[in-house]
């Protein structure tokens, strides 16, 4: 079983939802941006801003060429009860509550780490 990620349903702040998407997608973004020095530098700047817990929605909009609101709207459209269920002790969240990403590691797997800070995620 592989690790899964979901969002906490109480997410309401647009910037927090954008950061959640960013955290979840960061490994893929790093792979894609590694092929272009300019994009790689922009991504490094966004990661630095996210680590400092400053707003990143506008920076991501520039990097991706999209509206930060479009990703957040997609998250908000999830139907109640459509996510996976799991025991509370198997859920891990952002180490400092900056985003609402929740990860469920594989059984007996390592504690997941934050893609932005590298810190271990906190048990929820």
Image (cartoon, grey):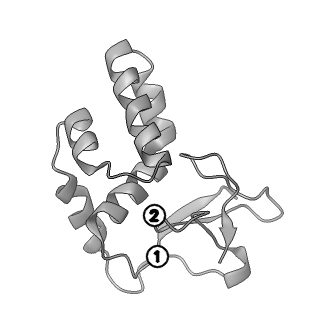
Q: State the image quarter where residue 86 is shown.
A: bottom right
The CA distance from mark 2 to mark 1 is: 9 Å
Quarter of the image with the C terminus is bottom right
Give left or right: position of 56 versus 8. left
What residue is shown at x 32% (from left), y 52% (from top)?
55
Which residue is disc 1 drawn over? 8
What residue is shown at x 53% (from left), y 46% (from top)?
116
Which residue is disc 2 drawn over? 99
Q: State the image quarter where residue 88 is shown.
A: bottom right
* Foreground residue among 23 and 15: 15
Quarter of the image with the N terminus is bottom right
Seen in the picture, residue 67 relative to 107 is either above or below; the reply is above
Give left or right: position of 58 versus 43. left
Circle 2 packing at 10 Å, graded few (<14), some (14-19), many (20+), is many
Q: Secondary structure at mark 1?
A: loop
What residue is shown at x 57% (from left), y 65% (from top)?
96
């Amino acid at each position: 079983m592989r690790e899964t990620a979901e969002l906490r349903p109480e997410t309401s702040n647009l910037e927090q939802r954008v950061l959640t998407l960013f955290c979840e997608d960061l490994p893929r973004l790093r792979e894609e941006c590694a092929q272009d020095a300019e994009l790689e530098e922009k991504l490094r700047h966004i990661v630095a801003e996210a680590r400092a817990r400053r707003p990143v929605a506008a920076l991501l909009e520039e990097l991706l060429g999209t509206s930060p609101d479009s990703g957040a709207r997609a998250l908000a459209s999830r139907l109640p009860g459509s996510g996976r269920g799991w025991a509370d002790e198997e859920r891990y969240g952002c180490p400092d509550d900056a985003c609402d990403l929740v990860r469920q590691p594989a059984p007996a797997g390592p504690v997941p780490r934050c893609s932005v800070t590298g810190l271990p995620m906190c048990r929820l």
